[in-house]
Image (spheres, rainbow, N blue to C red):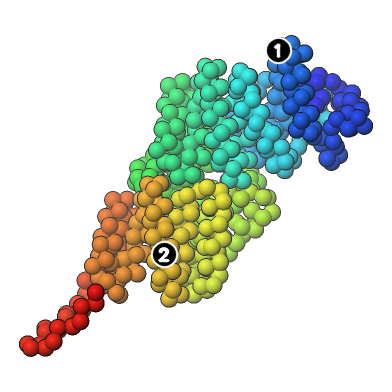
Amino acid sequence: MAAALAGLSLDAADRALDELVDGHLVDEVETGRYRMHDLLRQYSSELSARVDPAEERRSALRELLDFVLHASLRSAELLEPDFIRAQVSPPPPRRPDLLDAVGTPPVEWLERERAELVALVVRARESAHHAHAWRLARVLWRFCYMRAYFDDILLTHRHGLAAAEAAGEAPAVACMNNYMASAYVRTGDYAAALAHVSRAVAICERIGDRQNLFRYRANLLVVYLFRGDVHEAVVVGLESLRDSRASGHDITIGLPNIGLALAACGRYEDALRIHRLHLHWARIGRDYFHIQNALAHIGGVKVRLGRHHQAIRLLRASLALRDRTGHRYAEAEVRIDLGAAYRALGRLAEAEREHELALVLATDSGERHVEAAALNGLGRTLAAAGRDDEAAERYRAALRLATRIRSPYEQGRALAGLAAHFARTDPVEARRHGERALAIFRWMGVPERREVERCLAEVAAAPVAVEPAPVPGAAEPPDPR
């Protein structure tokens, strides 16, 4: 980076940095990695602004951005082979000598340099290096998504979008909108997600970008799903799948999302077929990110089918692969399903541990809909353990959160949990919560409505306690006030 910024060869930069270290102007914190004291950094920046011509400073920043973009792209290709380079389509590197020296940085290099890389996207946009700004934002997306750095995605893509618009590059504008939407979905802002991904789809339709159109439409499916439009999500997903087959595009793009939509509306066997196809293609491509997700999705469907031992094996395998690769994306959701499987087998302590861990992970990553799901799962486990008051507290917390982010599915689950809680003690409250849950589930068309219908039927069939008639002449009970 220093060599790129200063326009030096790697050897010359190494010698210059050694002299600066000897003069106590910079510190070598580890081999090949340097830092400067804050006061020296501020002074040197002010000095450069006074002494160095503006064009020379702009040129130095461009050289640094170009090197960082190409080095980051090589690392990102380990996570997104084949596709990402075609989408980013960078010009040839300006310093191939430096790139040859560093080779292909490991994925952990992105972790180590994350703060600097994010800051460089912002600096690139502010300095009107628009092409570098949006490209570097896109290069960082998959890494940030897999590690649940959603705030970084929103920051980099907000600046990347402004840069793409300033450059007048329609495909880049669509790209930034699409990937910004992914972070909004995970953090529970479905209205913003729908607006951004809809804009991405519209741009691709206008310019005839068929390949990215299929990809972005598959993401539109996810937004519909989280907003509660389950059947619309299935329709969009299956149409996209048919279109991709007819045109020869990669059919695997939308498979996981289509499987999730099918499972949500109770079409479990169809969902299994889709997720198994996803696993098949992921194994052929040796794409561990997609392998771990396909295993988790199959395990989630198995939980809903009552095949709990099979589900546990699949979900554990998915978690083991996450440990091996460092890809933490959707780990909280996997643990929620694992907790549900343990609960169904009566292994309540293990179920509670998984739900508690899922809650911590979701809270830390800012995934509010997953946080609501973890609260609902924990509530059900506590209820199964006879800890009814604690369960009700979790349901109420889930209901508040799901209402705030407008997640109808988790609202319905929380209301159903409260209906079951009140079923034995307060039939009026049970009916009130149960009828609200039933209305949501019927509107969504999801199978959870049957469980609520059974609960309401049991409440209606329960004997009603009748106050005994007062005995004439009997003393009135004391006023509790």
- The quadrant holding residue 268 is bottom left
Left or right of 55 in this view: 315:
left
- The quadrant holding residue 108 is top right
Point out residue 246 in the picture as x, y percentages from the top left corner. 45, 34
The quarter of the picture where the C terminus appears is bottom left
- Which amino acid lies under the numbered mark 2 shown in the image of this protein? Glu
Left or right of 472 in this view: 152:
right
Point out residue 439 in the picture as x, y percentages from the top left corner. 27, 55
Point out residue 271 in the picture as x, y percentages from the top left corner. 45, 53
Number of residue marks: 2
Pointer 1 residue: 54
For label 2, the SS is helix
For label 1, the SS is helix
Of the numbered discs in the image, which one, if any, rests on residue 96?
A: none
Left or right of 361 in this view: 32:
right
Residue at image position (23%, 67%) is 428
Which residue in the rendered view is the most extreme toward the left? 472
| Image vertical order of residue 336 relative to residue 19, above or below | below
Residue 447 shows in this picture: no
Of labels 1 and 2, earlier in sequence is: 1
Point out residue 9 in the picture as x, y percentages from the top left corner. 86, 22
Pointer 2 residue: 393
Residue 390 shows in this picture: yes
- Which amino acid lies under the numbered mark 1 shown in the image of this protein? Ala
Residue at image position (20%, 81%) is 478
Report the front residue among 451 and 384.
384
Q: Residues within 10 Å of mark 1 (few under 14, many from 20)?
A: few
